[in-house]
Amino acid sequence: MNHRDTKTQREPISETVNQVAKEIVDCAFAVHSQLGAGLLERVYEVCLIYELRKRGLNVVSQVELPVVYDDICLDAGFRLDLLVEQCVVVELKAVEALHPVHKAQLLTYLKLSGYRIGLLLNFNVPLIKDGIQRLVI
């Protein structure tokens, strides 16, 4: 028995979901190329929402994410920055550097929500490609 046999086998991410993620990244590049680094996270959020909607994508912002415990929904104060096309979670940052806690935050959101793909976007970088992390569970 090899190591892969001990892991839960998951369906591959669909091409549709991958395409949504690619569109989000493309929109992040567009926003960053116009605004650059150094602004507050909220500025990048409203501009990214605008850019995504301009391209015809369904975007919901600040989505409440309860924790289900003992069959009860509990408010733990979690909010998804963006949920795009009901399939990709986007966590936005405008920080000097991404840290493991930022990745852990997105992983928590993915696990609690049941969505499998998330993008961690840090706009406070000289090159946006250095501020993008894609997580899949």
Image (spheres, rainbow, N blue to C red):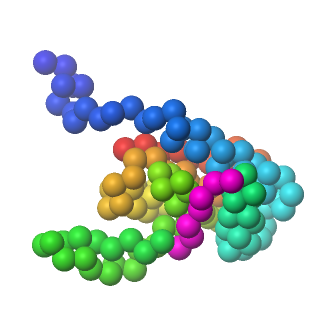
Q: Give the percent coordinates (x, y) of residue 42.
A: 68, 74
Query: On the rendered structure, is 93 left or right of 66?
Result: right
Q: Is residue 60 magenta?
A: yes
Quadrant in which the C terminus appears = top left
Quadrant in which the N terminus appears = top left
Q: Give the percent coordinates (x, y) of residue 62.
A: 53, 73
Looking at the picture, tell me which residue is in the foreground, 96 or 16: 16
Query: On the rendered structure, is 46 left or right of 99?
Result: right
* Residue at the extreme front of the image, as rendered: 56
Determine which quarter of the picture holds residue 68: bottom left
Q: Give the percent coordinates (x, y) of residue 115.
A: 39, 52
Q: Is residue 55 above or below residue 92?
A: above
Residue located at (45% from left, 58% from top) = 106
Which segment is the magenta one? 56-62
| Residue 84 visible in rendering | yes
Q: Give the percent coordinates (x, y) of residue 111.
A: 33, 56
Q: Is residue 66 magenta?
A: no
Looking at the picture, tell me which residue is in the foreground, 94 or 67: 67
Q: Is residue 103 above or below residue 93?
A: above
Q: Is residue 70 above or below residue 1?
A: below
Looking at the picture, tell me which residue is in the foreground, 58 or 114: 58
Circle count = 0
| Residue 104 visible in rendering | no
* Residue at the extreme right of the image, as rendered: 34
